[in-house]
Amino acid sequence: MSIAALLATWLPLIFSAATDIPKVVQNWIAFVKALAGAGIITAAEQDKLMAFLDGLLLSWAKGEIPPAWTVEPDPPTPATTTP
Amino acid sequence: MKIIRWTLLTLALPLLLGIGLSVTGCKKTLEPGGAYAATNTVPDITFYQIDSGFQAAYSTLDAAFNWERNNRDALWKISPSIKHDLDGIRPKAAEVVQNYAAARTAYKQHPTPAGLTTLQTILAKARQLMDTAQAVIANNLK
């Protein structure tokens, strides 16, 4: 797409958004509030991690080790063919 | 009129972004009432961070082991040392998980600074094994 075509597509969109300044500012305030909340680990997130590790480590304590964590025999090495 | 508004907007946006970033920074805090408030009277951020780090290390090791196991036949043809090197890590990783489980249970029953230090030491071992597993895969697939 040429620069002229890009400008023709995007400039009207940018300027139409810019005319509604209160709405844009409102969105930015919401964004800043969301950013401020990003530093807080919610109770639900904490509960999720605790439940995951409690369940995982309980199964390990019961001896339920995932098969991928155990050493299994090597696969058979394919026989080399001699001409 | 549109240009004036656009100019105001372009001036305001960086200002708002700057305020937002300076307010938030990188600080992490625990919301009261979560599971990590149960071990202490105040939310236990260090315990949460250790658990979070352990979950990441466990998930990486689990992904590496499963990837090798699920593709064993194909990888064996590329290089048997992928399995052999990961087999060298598997028992150590399993031991680390069991040690972490025991230390975590002990810490939940008696939350002490010494208990946290033990968990941190085990987490460091888990991370070391995670790095080794990643290196095994990267080095063998060069």
Image (cartoon, coloured by chain):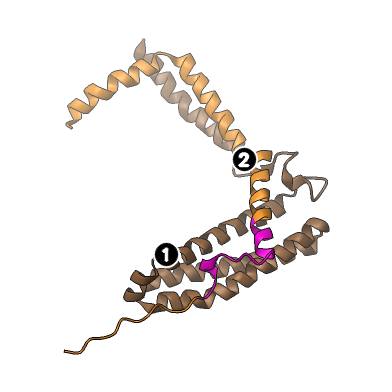
Range of magenta residues:
A56-71
Chain assigned orange:
A
Q: Residue at x 31, y 81 (%)?
A: A78
Q: Position of residue B82 (x, y in %)?
A: 41, 74
Residue under label 1, please give it: B70
Which amino acid lies under the numbered mark 1 shown in the image of this protein? Asn
* Viewer-nearest residue: A8 or B37: B37
Residue B21 seen in render: yes
* Viewer-nearest residue: B45 or B90: B90
Residue under label 2, please give it: A39
Q: Is residue B91 left or right of residue B36?
A: left
**Picture colour for chain B:** brown
Q: CA distance from mark 2 to mark 1?
A: 38 Å
Chain assignment, label 1:
B
Q: Is residue B118 left or right of residue B17?
A: right
Q: Is residue A67 magenta?
A: yes
